[in-house]
Amino acid sequence: MTTADVLVYTRTAGYRHDSIPAGAVALVELAAGLGRAAEVTEDPAAFAPERLAECAVVVLLSTTGNVLTSQGRTAFEAYLRGGGSLLAVHAAANAEPDWPFYGELLGTRFDGHPEIQPGAVLVDDREHPATGPLPERWDWTDEWYNFTSNPRTSGRSVRVLARADETAYRGGTHGADHPLAWCREIDRGRVFFTALGHAPEAYGDPVFRAHLGGALAWLTADLAPVAPST
């Protein structure tokens, strides 16, 4: 198995997004821009302690359903608690539905979406590398995810970076505070989630690529602890 600094995992056991190939290519390119090698895999055997020890970041790219073995879950939790990093993209909010730790890790779960349509992203935090490059109001077309609860109120020190403007599209269920991108720490590890990235063309968009690239940069940098939202 090839050693890589960034492990991009694309296994699905439910709905499979046709944007996964484009997303994988983009993440390999963005990792290279940070001077890091990347490997794309669907092999659950990658989630072994010795393999994860080689990874600066694990990316779950629109993974759906149960995509890890019980041994992989144990190894992945230990990796994150021990200082590893996770970038969860779009449908990764719908992964591992019967693993409580994963829901706690993200601070919420996927709870459906309206049809794909134009909307707007409101950037709350311009200090984070993943949202600093974005306009304060970013017009964007995506599959606007709803969640089972607001991660900001999960009690897990979540730092919300960007929200959906529910007045700009139909089908939102959270009102004025609809988080779309957030980060947190867990023990010595870091987690970043973005709900965006449904369509293949998103991964060629320079603004969205800056968003993902900033997330990777934050996950691999030696930065100050996360400050939770209030």
Image (cartoon, rainbow, N blue to C red):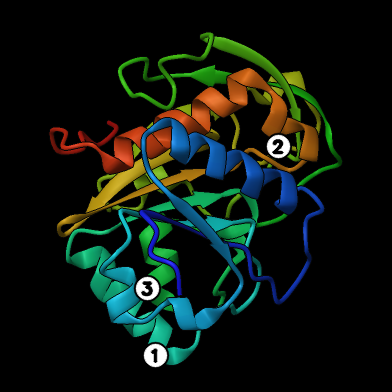
Q: Nearer the viewer, mark 3 or mark 2?
A: 3
User: How crowded is the residue under tag 3: few (<14 C-alpha within 10 Å), some, or many (20+)?
Assistant: few
> N-terminal of the two: label 3 or label 2?
3
Rendering coords of residue 73 (x, y %): 40, 81
- The residue sitting at 74% across, 73% down in the picture is 14
Query: Which structural element holds mark 1?
Result: helix
The label nearer to you, 3 versus 1, is: 1
The residue at the point 60 percent across, 26 percent down is 208
- Label 2: element kind: loop
| Residue identifier under label 1 | 71
Q: Amino acid at mark 1?
A: Gln
User: To which residue does mark 2 refer?
Assistant: 172
Asked if the residues shown at circle 3 and circle 2 are in contact, with their CB atoms under 8 angstroms apart, the answer is no
Is 17 in front, or is 155?
Answer: 17
Front one among 75 and 159: 75
Label 3 element class: helix
The x and y percentages for residue 182 are 41, 39
| Res 200 quadrant in image | top right
Residues at badges 3 and 1 in contact (C-beta under 8 Å)? Answer: no
Residue under label 3, please give it. Answer: 101
Q: Is residue 152 above or below residue 13?
A: above
Q: Which mark is residue 161?
A: none
**Front residue of this view, candidates 119 and 170:** 119
In screen coordinates, is 10 left or right of 5? right
Residue 61 lies, with reference to residue 168, above or below; the image says: below
Decide if residue 156 is on the left or right side of residue 214. left
Q: Marks 3/2: CA distance?
A: 26 Å
Three-letter code for the amino acid on which mark 3 is drawn: Phe
Front of the two marks 1 and 2 = 1
Quarter in which the N terminus is drawn: bottom left
Image coords of residue 219 (percent x, y)? 31, 42
CA separation in Å, label 3 and label 1: 14 Å
